[in-house]
Image: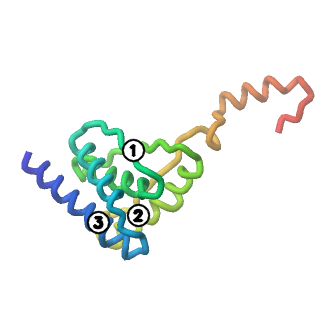
Amino acid sequence: MFYKVEYQKRAHQEVEKIFRVLLPEQGLAVREEQIRLCHEMLDTLLGERIALCDAGVGIGKTYAYLYSMLTGRGNPLEQRPVVVSTSSIALQKAIVTEYIPFLSRVLLEQGMIQSPLRAVVRKGKEHFVCDNRLEQRIEAIRHKQKNAA
């Protein structure tokens, strides 16, 4: 129990350092709502509970949930995957190509992580088509003299 309380305290201190010092040093603004959201999600994850968080446009939700997931997975030695469900393909791409590489770089430079963060998009072939459905579609049009492409 002592370990959990100490880890939770340290994780919240890291949230403060990330959002009040490190990210602003990289040109990002300090956003109080973002910091509160990250703390709330962190408490939820550490308490192994579920939370529904409503956050407005522009408060920095993405960094808040990404960082809370990094620190809120309980035992820092565990390498458990995290699943993020987004509302758009554009956000999926931004998380993988911008948000995670940026956060990874900052955390690596500070020695807060030892290896780069990794992420993959796991949503069918090119977002919507799986091999089985594609084969069914090709078979359906094969004899109709239509352009298969």
Label 2 to label 3: alpha-carbon separation: 11 Å
Q: Residues within 10 Å of mark 1 (few under 14, many from 20)?
A: few
Query: At which x and y percent is residue 16?
Result: 26, 64
Label located before the other in sequence (2 or 1): 1
Q: Nearer the viewer, mark 2 or mark 3?
A: 2
Q: Left or right: where does residue 78 sit relative to residue 95?
A: left
Q: In the image, what residue occupies the spot 40% across and 64% down?
A: 104
On the image, numbered disc 3 is attached to which residue?
A: 112
Which amino acid lies under the numbered mark 2 shown in the image of this protein? Leu
Which amino acid lies under the numbered mark 1 shown in the image of this protein? Asp
Asked which quadrant contains residue 94, the reply is: bottom right
Which amino acid lies under the numbered mark 3 shown in the image of this protein? Met
Q: Left or right: where does residue 63 sit relative to residue 68?
A: right
Helix, strand or loop for disc 3: loop
On the image, numbered disc 2 is attached to which residue?
A: 103
On the image, numbered disc 1 is attached to which residue?
A: 54
Label located before the other in sequence (2 or 3): 2
Nearer to the camera, 98 or 144: 98
